[in-house]
Image: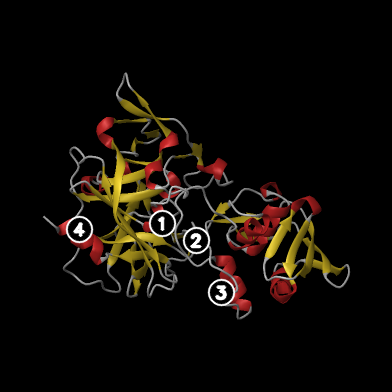
Amino acid sequence: MHNNRSRTFFALLLPILLPIGPAFAENAAYAQLKGRRDISRQDVPLPSFSSAKSIYGENSMHEYYQVPESLKKLADSTVAFVNKRNLYFDPLEKKYRIKNFSKVSESHYADENEDFSSQNKLSDCSGAYVGSGLVMTAGHCVSENKEDRSYFENYLMVFGWKYDKEGAAAQDFPMDAVYSIKKIETRALEGSGNNKDHRDFALVRMDREPAGRLPLSLETGQPLKVGQKVFTIGYPLGMAVKIDDPDQAQVYMINPTVFQTNMDVFGGNSGGPAFDSATGRIIGIVITAIGTEYSYELNQDFGFIADFSLDKDYIEYKPELGTVLAGAAVRDIVMGMLHDAHASISIMDGTKYLVTLPKGSRFENRSLMFSVVTQVGGIGLFKRGRLMRDSQDSFGTGVMRLPEEIIKLVQQP
């Protein structure tokens, strides 16, 4: 996909690119660099996608069987975007059965005592059925480019990926719960990511109109207000549907194309509907967040060589040499981060340093130091991750405001 320099550069900027549910966002490692030195976006290109999401305060995500009927009805009209390789069709039973999935604790190296760690992952993104065979999602969830991982023909849209009771997630799906994507009616994935001109949405047409599914309603009459209560329904980390508490989150900041909330979401929630808690109408599309997911602790000292002899402002990892290569222009930035991490640093020559990160050091999964350790030494140098929880009064879950392109297509006769 990329040459070695490209791979390692993006490994710096994107320490954790989950195999599910990416969300377009300014990367945390980029933000660290930018905060220490005036590096422009041209100097350090933004990655295309990030999956960072957060829990704010106490976990507000509930299983399908735990919520009242009114919320179940809304959840019944959401879909999980499932890669076709994860399902197979049983012609005798006329059902789609699950072929491939993994546990959250396995794929995310999460502590087994954390919320949801024993649950299975199946899907990549979330979506909302809005009538006439149309499903609304995020633009980064589907693509018309056959070379993209998110190419729309790679996916099936599945209703009913849920827990009907404790410990009993769906294992198969009837034919009338599974749909392919006939075409993308409209899509945008553009802007600088600063919430002023960012656009990330898609409306796709199903191969047939769904049986027995009520369309979710769009809120087109009432303006957004700071402080109004909001919630989402989606498939975080690819798990069975989770319904957020309608009373916990609110709108904090409103920008021209995106508004910010403190809804609990993770990668996999991307594309899911954001609802007005008072009306149950959709007011936006979940697209991004600024939080991290897990905190990791080194289980031993970790040493490596930092070599600043490159002639370009990027970073390469050479795990076979135990070395991180970087350009001289970013030496002060990287060395500052190492000092912040309480690393022991010894000069080897004019451009090389022997660095040791001490046992017990903690790094969030999207930090530069986490990337260094995992790229050079491997994930096994960390204890299993503990779920991050941001304070309840913080916020950062970005929601795409309903675009006119989608409103017009949904409302047309």
Whether residue 355 is visible to the viewer of this picture, yes or no, is: yes
| Between discs 2 and 4, the one toward the N terminus | 2
Q: So how many labels did they put on this image?
A: 4
Distance from disc 1 to disc 2, alpha carbons, whole Å, reads 9 Å
Can residue 240 be seen from the camera position used here? Answer: no
Q: Residue furthest left?
A: 413
Q: Secondary structure at mark 2?
A: loop
Residue 221 in the image: x percent, y percent?
Answer: 16, 68
Identity, as a three-letter code, of the amino acid under mark 4: Leu
Report, in whole angstroms, how far the alpha carbon at label 2 lies from the one at label 4: 27 Å
Label 1 close to label 2 by CB (< 8 Å) = yes
In the displayed structure image, the side of residue 112 where residue 71 appears, left or right: left
- Tell me the number on the disc at residue 140: 1
Query: What residue is shown with label 3?
Result: 42
**Between disc 3 and disc 2, whose residue precedes?**
3
Q: Which residue is mark 4?
A: 409
In x, y percent, where is residue 395?
42, 68
Which amino acid type corresponds to the residue marked 2 in the rendered image? Ser
Seen in the picture, residue 197 relative to 386 is either above or below; the reply is: below
Q: Is residue 62 above or below residue 14?
A: above
For residue 194, side relative to residue 307 (left or right): left
Q: CA distance from mark 3 to mark 4?
A: 36 Å
Query: Residue drawn at (19%, 56%), measured in percent from left and top?
Result: 410
Quadrant of the rendered image containing residue 259: bottom left
Q: Position of residue 83 (x, y in %)?
A: 42, 40
Query: To which residue does mark 2 refer?
Result: 48
